Each structure stands twice: as structure tokens, then as C-alpha cells.
Image (spheres, helix red, strand yellow):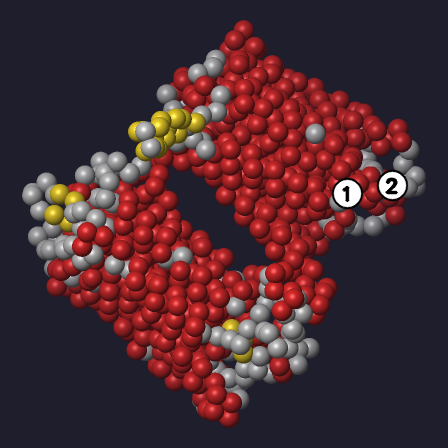
Amino acid sequence: MQSVATASRADQNRALGLSTVAFTACFAVWTIFSIIGVAIKDELGLNDTQFGLLVATPILTGSLTRIFLGVWTEKYGGRLVFSAQMLLAALATWALTLADTYPMYLLAALGVGLAGGSFIIGVAYVSRWYDAGHQGTALGIFGAGNVGAAITKFVAPFVMVAYGWQGVANVWAAGLAIMAVVFFLFAKDDPQLVERRRTGVRAPSFAEQFAPLKNLQVWRFSLYYFFVFGAFVALALWLPHYLIDVYGVDVKTAGMAAASFSLSASLFRAYGGHLSDKFGARAVMYWTFGFSLVFLFMLSYPPTDYVIQGKDGAIAFSTSMGLWPFVILLFALGFFMSLGKAAVFKHIPVYYPNHVGAVGGLVGMIGGLGGFVLPIAFGALLDLTGIYTSCFALLFVLVGIALSWMHLSIRAMERKARGAELDQLPALPEMEEIHVPGRTEMPRVLEDWHPEDPVFWAETGRRIARRNLWISIPALLLAFSVWMVWSMVVARLPAIGFAFTSEQLFWLAALPALSGATLRIFYGFMVPIFGGRLWTTLSTASLLLPAIGIGYAVQNPETPYIIFLSLALLCGLGGANFASSMANIGYFFPKAEKGNALALNAGLGNLGVSVMQFLVPIVITAGVFGAMGGAPQELSDGGQLWMQNAGFVWVPFIIAATVAAWVGMNDIADAKASFAQQAVIFGRTHNWLMCVLYIGTFGSFIGYSAGFPLLTKIAFPEVNALQYVFLGPLVGALSRAGTGWVSDRWGGGRVTFWVFAGMILAVFGVITALQAGSFIGFFAGFMALFALTGVGNASTFQMIPAIMGREVPRLMPNLGPVERARQIAMESGGIVAFTSAIGAYGGFFIPKAYGTSIAMTGSPVGALWLFLGFYVLCLAITWAAYTRRGGLLHDIEHGRSATAAAQPAE
């Protein structure tokens, strides 16, 4: 019998050595486009985005196949899978020379990408030869095969100069094919596979291997690897192009300079494995992320000219990074990324020793996808901003997110182990001497909150809950106003002297919806972590950034486009507030009143869109703030606009709402939960079903709000759309605020079903009106759609607590009454927040669908038919999952009293 314990040192060295050489060859092939892609770009005349897609396409195949190759390695052994994979990749690389059009190059690049799947094969194979105390070092040595990227950059330019890029492809393909044969002939089956064959034990099933993938921890590891490996691959592909364009060097110099980064990001991986074995992978990850933040900040700072008005006149100076400082900084960044790559894969065999293939495959796949997604993002950012260093700024943000998630997860783990002791500590170390447990806690924390108790609710709860609700509503109204104000600002930028292209204006209009929807995902988890009072205060105060920023930026036509991009992203803070606001208010009210409370909070908050669309056209026509507000902008027709007022007008109200939130709101002690505790919702099927339904309701509301003015202008150019744009959001907001009681009385499932039925009819009416050229029919159809989305927004949110009231007892039967109520409230709040995030993407996709439909067919009718089909899907989901006989909500909503409906099913 052969096992890890009895495997000889010679066999271990054989397995490690052959795997490392094979992986080096595969990686050299996988990154071949970083060199030959430059020649293909010139040959085909590709733009930056097309070039980014070409060099990233092999990374897509190599990433997506990793999870399957890892599972097959666990089942069939690394010797067979590794050899077959290398042969297929070699054939695809040879076939690359036969392509002669851009689509054919992309197709061939997919085959070349098979070489990238080799990493997980080697991880699963090598880890079986070593015990846990030496796996970090062994996998670090194997991972140093990333140096194949450096080999390509060192050698390929010289081969390409001598024989053309086709010669590079032929030589690399031949070398990989030879390595495949050598590996098959000289490698041995791993000890675990030999033992399994000897005893006749069946290989683990796919379901057994994939089981750990439900753990959030695996996805956190994947994010780490998305940076340390995905960004490494992306930069390895992008840097030659970057160096040629920015520093004007030739392809050989660019290749060697980029190779220094690839070299440091590869060779030191073995050292990273040793450090992980010695000091722990967690410490190494802190070093990696900490130093990477510093280096990426320096790399992301663009060449800049400064003029400072000094005592004796203007002082001018500039900052820029020369070629050699740039190369040295990249070398240092690569060093810490190589340590991080080893540290991530040190975790996997320790935490998941029997699932290295599946878990490592997923982590490797996500990391590899970084190598696919990031070059495309680099090219898009460069086309969008015109700033070369924008690629490093993106990575800076990515590292910040990864470091924050890692640190919060570690703190949550510490709190789970030592929560009682930590709760006795003051919020700030400086308060230690005056902190007396039991006497100096914040008075705004509600330690005893039982809204389902009728006596408590009547005597104490209702008054406190309503106070928090009526403070939350104006704060949310301001958030929606700031979120959507950008659409009004962007529309007038050309008129006041900003020479942005239509594509640039589209991105400015779309980014608030994208950032708001994305930030909602994170905001939804913040209330249980920080408390509703503190988070409402902070999130409301954050609205001052875009409001004041807009006020100053629009006054100078020389304001750089990047500033407007930043302000567009910051406007998304307003859209994100909805998720935390709804999650917070949901904790205060009993089930019987939760639907109406959420409807009032959301509906009157949504009213901010109409308030903004009504108020901004008025305030920009007058100097409301006098000299303090700045001078007006001159229009081409001789008129004047005070566009800065579109931002400044909200400032005093935001300040007032911030103070009111801090002074008047409360935190609920039982509403505290870590992100890990809340993350249970990602395993709930109904979370995802409700996301689909809320896209149909709120996604439609916010998308129609954004697209209604432009669609009206295109379809009926003779109509002054600005006179009517505020009516749609107004109708939708008021219907949401005024119909929450309907769902509380008749059941959210039934109301949602009929809402989607009505939306199907209304969209059909709009299509008919457009084809007939009837503005009256068109307008009436959209008013009906807005009204129905408002009703549906309220009813879908009323469904969520009822759904979890039945699901939590079924899924967690061991919970006591108090723990069950707390779990239901926590999961309901989390699902409300998460669905609100997903639904908000409608603000981007609906206007984009209009534009795509018009570009393809000359009419928006195609997009409307698509929306109608989606509502049919939503109708079917509502009926099948919730309202049919036997559906989850059928018993609650048919024949049961309101009191019974409020109780969770046993």
C-alpha cells in the first residue's frame, strides 16, 4: 500500500518536479497572447477594448474549466487528467495559426485557454503526496510555475522578431505536447488513487465533492484569489501594452520589463508557502493586502500638473513616475502577490482536506476569471476615462474590499469566541477610564424589544417604532432625490458648456444606478453590524458628498470627466440607503403591521424621485443661494442656469435629517448580527425567487422612472415630456405608500399575483398604443404600470416575513421561541435588503434595453415585449411557489384570520 506516510522522498520529489515543470509550460502557453496579442492587435487594427477581450479570452476557458478539472483529478487521478489536458491545449495553440479574422482568433483563444486549467490539476495531485505540515511549501513550489508567464515575456519577443508570432505559437505548442508525453510516461498515480483502487472504494460523487461550496468561507477565499492570481494574470497580459503606450518602449523592452513583474509574482510563491507553514496563512494575507494597498495607491496616481497660488505668485510643479521606479514598484507588488497566492492555497487542504479538487477548483476558477474580467475592465476604463493608471485604481478598490472582508470575518470569529468579554469594552480605547459596564452604555439601545407582544406594543412599542419610521422616511426621500438628481444634471451638461460625447453622457447617466444597486448588497448587511441609528446617521450624512460635489463641479466647464464619473458613483450612495433603511424599519414592527410600515417607508421614500424632478427644474432657474451659491452658467440662447443648485438645494435638508437620525432614532440590541450570521440567506431558495419578483416590481419602477422621459421624447417628439416626467414616479411612490394595508389584509402573494397580471395587460396596452401612435394610450398604459409597480413593491416586501415565518421553523426546528423570532426577523431583514439591491439593477437595464431595441429594430417595442415575457415568468413563479393550493402562502392567505396569519407555521 502506498500512502502519504509511506511515500518515498523520491516519489514526492518526482511528483512535485514533474508537476511544476508541466505547470510552467502550461502557464507559458496560457499567457502567450500577452506578446503575440500586440502583433495581432496591429494586424487587425483592434481598439483597446477588443484587445482586452482577445488577451482575456484564454483566461476565461482556463478559469471555467478549473472546477471540472479539479473534480476529475479527484476521481481519475492527476497523471491521466494532466496529460490529456496538455495535449488538447497544445493542439488548440497550433490551430491558432490558422485563424485569419477576429472572431476566429477569439474561438482559437478559447482552446488555448485550456492550458490555464492545469493549476488545479497540479494542486489536487501534489497535495496528495504531502502531509498538512508540508503542503504549504510543496504547493508554493508548484505554484512557482507561474514563472511560465515570465518565460513567455523573456523569450517570445525574440522568437517573434525572428519567425513572426506564428512561430511563437508553433514552438509553444510543440513544447507543451512533448511535456504531456513526458508527464504521462514518468509520473506516478497519487497515493490516494492507488489506495482507492486497491481497496475498491468508489470515488466520491460530484455532489459529495461540491458540498463544501455552500460555505461562504470558500467564496471569501475566492475573492482573495481573484486579486492575488486574477490581477497577476491580468497585469501580465496588460503590462506590455501599457508600457509601450505610456513609456514608448519597444516590444522587447516592454516584454522584459513586464517579465520582471511576472518573475517576482511567480518565483516567490514557494517562499510564500514556507512563510504560510511557519507564521500562518492569515498573517501572510495581511502582509499581502496591506503592502498591495500602498503600492497600488502609488501606481494609480496619474501624472499630474499642480499650480498653487503662493505668497509670491503661482507655484507650478508636476508629479509622474518614471519607467524604472514603475518597474521596481511592480516587482515589489508581484512579490507580495506571490506570497498571497501561496497563502490562499495553504488554507484549502487544511480546511477541506477531502475536497481539495472541488474547493480548489472553485477558488482557482474565480481567480482565473479575474484574469478574464480585469483586462476587459482595464480596456473599458481606459476607453472611458482616458487615464492609463485607472487599471491600478480598480485594483486598489478590489484590495480594499478583500482586506475589509477578511478583517471583518476574523473579528466576527473573535467575537463569536469572546463576545461577552468584548461587549464589556468601550467603543474607543480613550474611554476606558470612564467606561463603567451597566452604567455608561448608549441610552438609545433598546435592550428589550418584543413587538409581537400586544401589551408591549400598545404601551411602548408603537410609539417608538413610529418615531423611528417618521425619521427614516425623510432621510430615505432625500436619498432617492440625490440618487436620481444626476439624471437631471447630465441632461443639461451640454447646454452649459461641457463637451462630453454621447457615450460619455450615457455612462454618467448609468453609473448611479449601477453603483446604487451594487452598494445595496453591502448596505443591507450593515444595520445588524453597526446598528440602525448609527448607520442611518452615517449613510444620510454621506449624501453630502455628491450633493456638494455636484454644486462645485458643474460651475467650471474645465472640470475633468473623471470627477463627474466619481460624482456619478457617489450618487449611488443615495440608492444604496434604501436597503439599510428597509432592513432597519423591518425590525421595529410586528408582522401584522410590517407590510404597511415598509410600504410607507419605501413609498414615501420613492417619492424623492418625483420631488427631485419637480424641484430641480425650479431651483436651477434662480440664484437661490445668492453669492454664496456661485455665478450662473450662460446658455447659448442667452439664458442663465444655476445648475449648482441641483446639488446645493439638498444640503440643508441632509444636515437636518442626519441630526434627526442621531438624536431621535434607536438601535435594537436583538437586531445585532455578524455578516456570517446574515449570510445564511444566500442558501435560502426563496431569497432568490423574491429577487426575481422584486426585479419585476421595483426594478420596473426605477427603470421606467429613468427611461420614461427619453422614451416619450423618442416616441412622441411633438410632446413636451418634461411636463409629465414626475407624474410616473409620483403615482408609483404614492401607490406603494398607500397600498401596504391591502397586502396586510389580503396577503402579499395574492396581491403580487394580480399585480403581475395587470402589468402584463398594461405593457400590452403600451405596445398597442405605440404601434397606433396614440400618446393618450401610451401615457395611460405607463401610469397604470407605475401604479402597479408601487402596489407590487409593497406586496413583495410583505411576503418576505410571512415566507420566513414558515421556512425558519421548518429549516431550524431546534430553535426556541425567542431565538426563532430573532432568526425570522434577521433573515427577513437580510432578504428585504438583498432583494432591494438586485431589483435596483432595473434602473440600468431597462433604459439600456430601450437603447438596444431601438438600435437593432428602430423601435422600443422589442424591449417592451421582453418585459412582458419577464412578467409572465414572475406570474408563474408567484403562482407555483406561493399562491396555488399547496403553495407556501396559500394557507396563510386563504381562510386564516389575520392573527393566525401573523404566527409562524410550526
282 or 432, nearer to the observer:
432
Q: Position of residue 71 (x, y in %)?
A: 69, 44
**Left or right for 888, reference 334:** left
Q: Which residue is mark 1?
A: 279
Q: Where residue 198 appears, x then y in whole percent?
A: 88, 44
135 vs 533, left or right, is: right
- Of residues 146 and 332, the one nearer the viewer is 332
Q: Which residue ends up furthest to the front in the rendered image?
A: 311
Which image quadrant for residue 63? top right
Residue at (83% x, 28% y) in the render: 14
Name which residue lies at 47% across and 64% down.
535
Q: Quadrant of the C terminus?
A: bottom right
Q: Nearer the viewer, mark 2 or mark 1?
A: 1
How far apart marks 2 and 1 lie (CA) works out to 24 Å
- 12 in relation to 769, above or below: above
Is residue 599 in view?
A: no
Q: Quadrant of residue 432?
A: bottom right
Residue 342 lies, with reference to residue 465, above or below; the image says above
Q: Residues within 10 Å of mark 1 (few under 14, many from 20)?
A: few
Q: Residue 566, how many percent across, how many down?
A: 37, 44
Q: Secondary structure at mark 2?
A: loop
Q: Is residue 258 above or below residue 771?
A: above
Q: Nearer the viewer, residue 63 or 274?
A: 274
| Mark number displayed over residue 4 | 2
Amino acid type, mark 2? Val
Residue located 66% across and 55% down the image? 410
Q: Quadrant of the N terminus?
A: top right
